[in-house]
Image (spheres, rainbow, N blue to C red):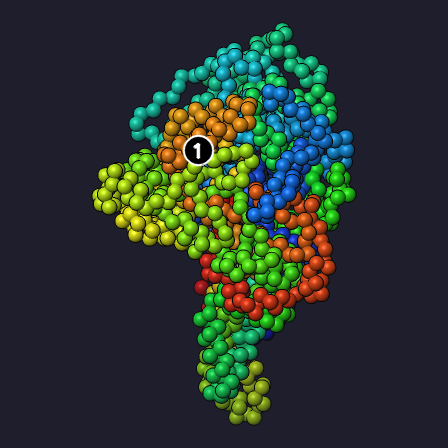
Amino acid sequence: MPPELRRLFAILAVVVMGIAVVWATRFDSMPPADFSIQNGTDPKTLDPHRATGQPESRILFGIFSGLLQMLPDGDPDPETGLQPMSAQPAVAKSYEVSDDKLTYTFHLRDDAVWSDGVPITSADFVWSWTRMLHPATACEYNFQLFSVPFAEQFSSGIVNVGDRCEVELFDRPNPDGTTEADTGELNIQNFPRGTMLYGTLREIRKPSEPEFDDSVSEEDREDAMVKWQEKWVYVLDIANVSDDGEVDWDGPTTTQTFTAHANSPIAEPDTRRIHNVLVAFSKLGGVETPDDRTLVVNLKDPLPYFPSLTAYYPLFPVPRHTIEKHGMPMWTKAENIVSNGAYVVGLRRLRDRVRLVKNPRWFAADEVAIETIDALSTEGQNTALNMYETGQIDWVTDPPTALMETLKKRDDFYAAPMLSVYFFRMNTTRKPLDDPRVRRALAMAIDRQQIVDQVAKAGQVPAYALVPPGIAGYEPPPGFKPDIEEAKRLLAEAGFPGGRGMPKVTVLYNTSEGHRAIAEVIQQQLQNNLNVKLELQNMEWGSFLDKTNQLDYDIARAGWIADYADPNTFLDLWLTDGPQNSTGWSNAEFDRLLKAAAAESDMATRMKYLSDAEAIWIEEMPVIPLYFYVGINMVKPRIKGFFPSPQDLHPLHLMSIDDSADPKVATDRQVTPRVVASNPPDLAVPSQRTSVSIKPIAERASAK
Amino acid sequence: MKDLLSYAIRRFGWMLLTVWAVYTVSFVLMRAVPGNPFSSERTVPPAIERQLRARYNLDAPPIEQYTDYLVGIVTRGDLGVSIRLEDYTVNEVLAEGFPVSASLAILALVFALTLGVTAGVVSAVYRGSIGDVALMATAVLGIAIPNFVLASLAILLFVFLIPIFPAAGWGTLRQVALPALCLGAPVAAYVARLTRAGMLEVLGREHVRTAFAKGLPKSTVILKHVLPGALLPVVSYLGPATASVLTGSLVLEKIFALPGIGSHFIYAATQRDYTLAMGMVLTYTVLLFVMNSLVDLSYAVIDPRVKLQ
């Protein structure tokens, strides 16, 4: 290598470094928003039909509006400061309920428009709900509409001979103007749909069913069955559809055959290729649109909490014109998304923020006080608190657990009971926990007050039942009492006097400091009180869920946040073989009571059924309830209109900014010496755990 | 020049091979661990899970998934859609996060080199003085203290006690300064020690004694005759330094709430986001391989004794 080249190389290296530095220090900076929220993490998606967690819901409640919305109703609870909320008009200006509580008639506002000016009609709701329920949308909250006739059948894709069905032909339009029929390529966008035909299912022809010997694994078996089902040929009597979309079910029909498989062995020459045959949910009167401004919903069960379901985002309308134009998930990009809430999405940057901008076309835009809001994806608890203390964040949703005791004393700290419960599942299919007496003994011997006071520390409420307090009209059954003597007696009765002979029981929890601390306290208490030895086992989130779902555990921690303000959201978890059950527990009387409650239109009787069901549950104790969570928030005094609420809902459009209320912030948003002086090291030192382990979003979604 | 070219080609071949091996191992490992991208506390009904699997081609036989995905990467540079961040493709995630991580890494490295080399030269020249002892003691501390502890101390000091930097966030030079310092500090410490050792070795050489004997000014001798030789170990350390800066940023990105790609790495793994995790692993592999090759290359250019093999 000649020396000149070497010198050239040195110069080159310096130049490259210089360019790199110049590039690295160029930023497109952005002025901060008027109001910044710690949103915990990135929203998984902004599609209301695909979202599940809290970070998503905070944004979705801001950018979309449903038929109704949850708003403050009445005075705050003097004891807890909790502001009761109820479902009040939003896109619907009013609604009526029939006497049998089965028919809801919603009247839509005349001035309800999407943020691009397109009016919102009742048909938008039917379309949105159809999309929400469609199997290929895979909405996890689809069950919220299952009280509408045929919704469950449509969503699960089950059809029986004799059902009135819809058939989607294999000709979904592609973005380039062609259709699937032209190209032969599958388009996975389930909306816009291909040509729809309606008719009554006459027959399902099936090729010979695949047979398996014992060596075939479960997975392969399932796979083969799905492939086999694809080859089925459906015979339908196709009915005529009038120009306005009405199906003439009883009129003249033509018989046709269809199959989802490209070349099914039993297809006839005129068998048409389709995507699927589903129950014709949208044409069977569950939801009706007499005109553009009226939406009629005919329920099959008198659901007292149906209005509040319409105020929850899975039932919100989504913009058909935008989704059909851009497809999923492109329609949720900041530059494409059209919404109908108080705010619209201005910008989305991963791991950074979602910027919300006031929507001038919202029907109550005059009442919206804050122009721009940043939902920051800040994850670190300490990071968020540091930013709060230095004025970069106005609302912390997840303060550091280690500092709870110090923070709890501050005026800007809000802790209020929430409809959610922390519990331990027990595997009732395994010895010794298959014996209710053992389960009760364990539950009774735990001192929850100690856990709440010394571990959780934010003012959680010890739980001696399943349903959290604070649901209007619900009279909970008397729970159980912590009673060590009784626990000892039960254990002896079950054949383990003084804990002797009791098999080893393992407590499984997902890796987290908080869960470990709680499990350790319980381990200690049961050892001291009952002489029962627990082993602790922690597992990373994915493996933990697998173990729990496959009933491969003794005791496993869990948490549940109410989906709606009704005891049913906690009770129906434990239905026999329910998807969330995962304990192996089953009780026919319990199932019967829940079913009776669902069909009951009298509010008081219904609540009585639910309360009786909970009493059975407490008697049988398939899980150990530990405590009811509290919703914890820290909000700067300059933010007005924030109040604690039972479901931790905080409507953004009710908030406003008053800089005079926070002189410190108004004069200098950089320093707050007060806290630093009181507790400097803790404040700034992110513990090793929070800096290297990241809590899965899903966990945050259903249980903090 | 010719051996340079053939070296580059050979390294490129090795890189493809490495990336392919990494791809294969990651693919197998990811599917071998329990759990799947759709597990959550709220159990997803089987029908819905089937639909989701179909959407992400996870219902195909593993071999087909393996080849389909590989073909997509090779022919279209398409790393697929992220399963957990469903509004984004993996390419979009990388495009948004990579510049941030790169900026941070560049600033940290430049800072580390500038500070480290300066400190190393000073302490070698004034060997044995109080300054030398102090600098080297600091350097040992710098190597020993992990960067998240350093970050906490720095936040305490420069955000709360002397409020000159914001606590976190991204978008201005002031916001990036603190994380870059914390990320670069351990590297700087190591560079300082390497420079000092290299300087001392070269200072004892005969050509340096000759230069002094010729009556050249001290600064000329140091800069022209000592430093180039003394920097060789530093250059060879740049490869590992890049690796340490890239992996170190995972932690700092979280503490300082920076929108880089580091945190996606952990997220993707814990949430079984197969595509995103694969995208991250491959990106890091390519990045580290390229940086190491560049370092080897420049090493050969600077040091006439090194032959490219």
Image location (x, y in percent) of residue A240: 65, 12
| Mark 1 crowd level (few <14, some 14–19, many ≥20, 10 Å Cα) | many
The image quarter in which residue A34 lies: bottom right
**Please, what secondary structure does the residue beneath circle 1 have?**
helix
Image location (x, y in percent) of residue A112: 74, 33
How many numbered discs sit on the rendered protein? 1
The answer to whether any part of residue A46 appears in the image is: no
Image location (x, y in percent) of residue B224: 56, 82
The image quarter in which residue A134 lies: top right
- Does A138 sit above or below residue B253? above
- Nearer the observer, A406 or A344: A406
- Nearer the observer, A28 or A437: A437
Residue shown at the point (55%, 31%) measured from the top left: A144
Q: Is residue A99 left or right of residue A566?
A: right
> Circle 1 marks a residue in which chain?
A
Residue shown at the point (50%, 32%) measured from the top left: A568
Q: Which residue in the structure is indicated by mark 1?
A: A614
In the picture as drawn, the residue positioned furthest to the left comes out as A501
- Nearer the observer, A8 or B170: B170
The image quarter in which residue A619 lies: top left
Residue shown at the point (55%, 24%) measured from the top left: A602
Amino acid at pointer 1: Glu
Image location (x, y in percent) of residue B139: 48, 76
